[in-house]
């Protein structure tokens, strides 16, 4: 089973803005997003513990740095996640770009979603 989730800032109640700045390092499997509306930062999964200050995302098509972030979840049994892939969609031109991926050890879906 696979699922895709668009990430929004949880600091805004039911109206969660999805535009953000993002920093990621594909080689290290880390990522962090910062809400454009309020500046709140969220490190994905265990990224904060391994943070290396990677560069901010910039679209390779138009150079814009604001994106919407989505994650793809690989859930072979349906209840736990083994792999997460993080991608950005440029809000200026719509180009998609892969940011990083993270291999997990069968973490429950609800735990993963709470840490994204």
Image (cartoon, helix red, strand yellow):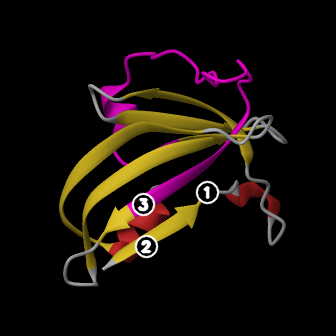
Residue 66 position by quadrant: top right
In the displayed structure, does residue 71 sit left or right of residue 79? right
Kind of element beneath mark 1 = loop
Label 2 environment density (alpha carbons within 10 Å; few <14, some 14–19, many ≥20): few
Where's residue 44, x and y in %? 44, 45
Residue identifier under label 3? 72
Mark drawn on residue 3: 2
Q: Residue at position x 69%, y 38% from top?
A: 67
Label 3 environment density (alpha carbons within 10 Å; few <14, some 14–19, many ≥20): some
Q: Count the marks.
A: 3
Residue 89 position by quadrant: top right
Where's residue 63, x and y in %? 70, 18
Residue 26 position by quadrant: top left
Counting residues from the start of the chain, the first of labels 2 and 3 encountered is 2
Q: CA–CA distance between discs 1 and 3?
A: 11 Å
Where's residue 74, x and y in %? 29, 67
Q: Main secondary structure of the magenta part?
A: loop
Q: Nearer the viewer, residue 42 or 63?
A: 63
Residue identifier under label 1? 7
Whether tag 2 and tag 3 are in contact, CB under 8 A, the answer is: yes
């Amino acid at each position: 089973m696979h699922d895709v989730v668009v990430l929004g800032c949880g600091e805004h109640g039911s109206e969660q803005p999805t535009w953000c700045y993002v920093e990621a390092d594909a080689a290290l499997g880390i990522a962090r997003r910062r809400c454009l509306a309020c500046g709140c930062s969220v490190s994905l999964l265990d990224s904060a513990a391994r943070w290396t200050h990677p560069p901010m995302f910039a679209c390779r098509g138009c150079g814009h740095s604001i994106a919407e972030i989505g994650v793809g979840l690989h859930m072979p049994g349906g209840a736990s996640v083994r792999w997460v892939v993080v991608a950005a969609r440029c809000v200026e031109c719509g180009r998609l770009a892969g940011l990083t991926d993270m291999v997990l050890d069968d973490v429950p879906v609800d735990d993963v979603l709470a840490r994204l």
